[in-house]
Amino acid sequence: MALFDLIGRRWTLRVIWELEQAGQPLTFRELRTACGDLSSSVLTRRLHELTQALLIERTSAGYALTSTGSSLVASLEPVLAWARDWSRTRPASAGRDQCALELESLIPAGQKNFDLPTGFPDREADQERGVPGNADGRNGLRR
């Protein structure tokens, strides 16, 4: 569950995706530019979390995926294929327009967006806003 908590945080998958697509280490500035609207403070936080999880490393040339990080990207391929199929089968009345756009943005078919759909909570942001159930990291779920 810790992995889902980490990759479920806003911008985490986008950072991983940009590092994967680059094929070489990216500096902080290059990574921030590649991610678009990502703030410096959130990027700093995500880089720290991903480094602590051993998914990325900081080299003299910049940030790069570790072999574990590359393995994670490869393991997400079946999920991305499922998301592509699922998004195409949802009827418009079920919110396909927005949902499909968000899910299709995860698919590596020449697109540069690998972020989670909007609306997924960021635990730290929820804690800062005082959202109940998130202070212990369980997101309101019982164990």
Image (cartoon, rainbow, N blue to C red):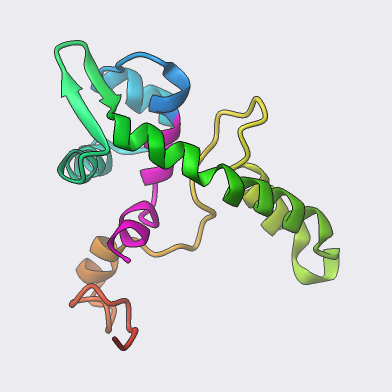
Image position of 131 (left or right of 73): left
Q: Is residue 84 above or below residue 54?
A: below
- Which one is in front, 40 or 65? 65
Residue 52: quarter of image:
top left
Q: Which residue occupies 67% across, 45% down?
A: 104
Q: Which residue occupies 54% across, 35% down?
A: 113
Q: Is residue 119 above or below residue 55?
A: below
Q: Is residue 37 visible?
A: no
Which residue of the protein is positioned furthest toward the bottom in this rendering? 142
Image position of 54 (left or right of 116): left
Residue 25 sits inside the magenta stretch: no
Tell me residue 1's x, y (percent): 33, 66
Residue 8 sits inside the magenta stretch: yes
Residue 125: quarter of image:
bottom left
Tell me residue 79's x, y (percent): 58, 51
Q: Is residue 84 visible?
A: yes
Tell me residue 2's x, y (percent): 28, 62
Tell me residue 18's x, y (percent): 43, 28
- Which one is in front, 79 or 102? 79
What is the count of numbered marks?
A: 0
Image position of 83 (left or right of 50): right
Q: Is residue 139 above or below residue 111?
A: below
Q: Is residue 51 above or below residue 9?
A: above
Which secondary structure type mostly characterizes the magenta part of the structure?
A: helix
Work out which quarter of the rendered image holds the C terminus and state it: bottom left
Q: Which residues are magenta?
A: 1-17
Q: Which residue occupies 22% across, 70% down?
A: 127
Residue 141: quarter of image:
bottom left
Q: Which residue occupies 63% across, 50% down?
A: 102
